[in-house]
């Protein structure tokens, strides 16, 4: 059996995309699924969010080397301090590599080809993509079975979502007919404000059953955890944010059965 590959993306930044990727991978691993998190965002926040210093010269091989065909994916993967949880780290150099391959052959399928070499070793592969519709994002969509869309419950939340879904349709038509929308996750939800509720209802109206029942609350612990280099479940497992990500992971497991 090969892994279920899920890319996490939204072309809008600051929606909890990386936080979702890191915590989903963490809780899948906690549930005894062998999990790989691929940091494919040049910002490298998933890398630093797991306590790996992304700017140090001795980081070794990274996703930049994979994208440039200088290294195989298994040479980049390292284990984290958590059981069943591996990471393929990245550095900001990935942005330069993206520019470098624009004129090269097979520029859209590099990640898919790399993922295929390791997918038999994992139950889940989570790919954290950049907050833009870039060559890296298209690579991520082509490499995946599922697309997970975090949307923050704030004004302008659905702006750009239509464009992302258009890109997804194009990828399905031309390169990956098996890609499907796993679901939409409402993040930074504050039930005390009518705006949050209003936006959440709008998301449910638009995406219907694809909207996850679990919402991720605005939570100080969720915001603090990455600066300590750990997922929120390891930072404060009793926090509202940790409990929400745990519940959300159960929903993902259910939907990908």
Image (cartoon, helix red, strand yellow):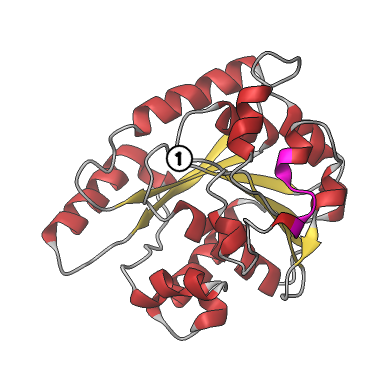
Q: Residue furthest left?
A: 194
- The image quarter containing residue 31 is bottom right
The residue sitting at 59% across, 22% down in the picture is 172
Name the foreground residue: 229 vs 56.
56
Q: Nearer the viewer, residue 8 or 63?
A: 63
User: In this view, which residue lies farthest toward the front?
Assistant: 57
Mark 1: secondary structure: loop
206 vs 117, left or right, is: left
Residue 141 appears at what percent x and percent y? 60, 33
Residue 148 percent coordinates (x, y): 51, 45
User: Which residue is disc 1 drawn over?
Assistant: 131
- Answer whether residue 29 is visible to the viewer in this image: yes
| 201 in relation to 220, above or below | above
Q: Is residue 179 visible?
A: no
Label 1 CA crowd tier, 10 Å (few <14, some 14–19, many 20+): many
Magenta highlight on residue 59: yes
Residue at left offset 62%, top offset 29%: 98
x and y percentages locating residue 56 in the rendered image? 67, 59
Decide if residue 222 is on the left or right side of residue 29. left
Residue 161 coordinates in the image, percent (x, y): 36, 34
Q: Nearer the viewer, residue 159 or 104?
A: 104
Does residue 194 sit above or below 150 in this rendering? below
* Res 97 → quadrant: top right
What's the magenta region? 58-64
In the rendered view, does 15 fall on the left or right side of 103? left
- Residue located 34% across and 75% down the image: 220
């Amino acid at each position: 059996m090969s892994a279920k590959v899920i890319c996490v993306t939204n072309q809008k930044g600051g929606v909890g995309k990386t936080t979702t990727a890191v915590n989903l991978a963490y809780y899948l691993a906690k549930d005894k699924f062998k999990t790989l998190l691929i940091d494919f965002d040049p910002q490298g926040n998933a890398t630093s969010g797991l306590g790996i210093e992304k700017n140090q010269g001795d980081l070794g091989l990274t996703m930049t080397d994979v994208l440039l065909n200088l290294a195989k994916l298994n040479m980049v993967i390292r284990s984290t301090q958590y059981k069943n949880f591996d990471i393929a780290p990245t550095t900001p150099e990935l942005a330069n590599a993206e520019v470098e391959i624009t004129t090269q052959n097979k520029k859209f399928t590099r990640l898919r080809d790399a993922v295929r070499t390791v997918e038999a070793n994992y139950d889940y592969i989570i790919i954290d993509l950049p907050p833009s519709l870039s060559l890296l994002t298209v690579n991520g969509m082509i490499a995946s079975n599922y697309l997970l869309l975090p949307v923050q419950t704030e004004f302008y939340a659905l702006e750009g979502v239509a464009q992302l879904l258009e890109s997804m349709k194009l990828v399905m038509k031309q390169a990956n007919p098996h890609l499907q929308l796993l679901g939409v996750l409402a993040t930074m939800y504050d039930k005390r404000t009518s705006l949050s509720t209003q936006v959440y209802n709008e998301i449910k109206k638009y995406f219907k059953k694809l909207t996850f029942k679990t919402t991720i609350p605005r939570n100080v612990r969720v915001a603090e955890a990455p600066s300590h280099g750990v997922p929120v479940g390891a930072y404060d497992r009793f926090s509202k944010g940790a409990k929400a990500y745990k519940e959300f992971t159960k929903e993902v497991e259910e939907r990908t059965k």
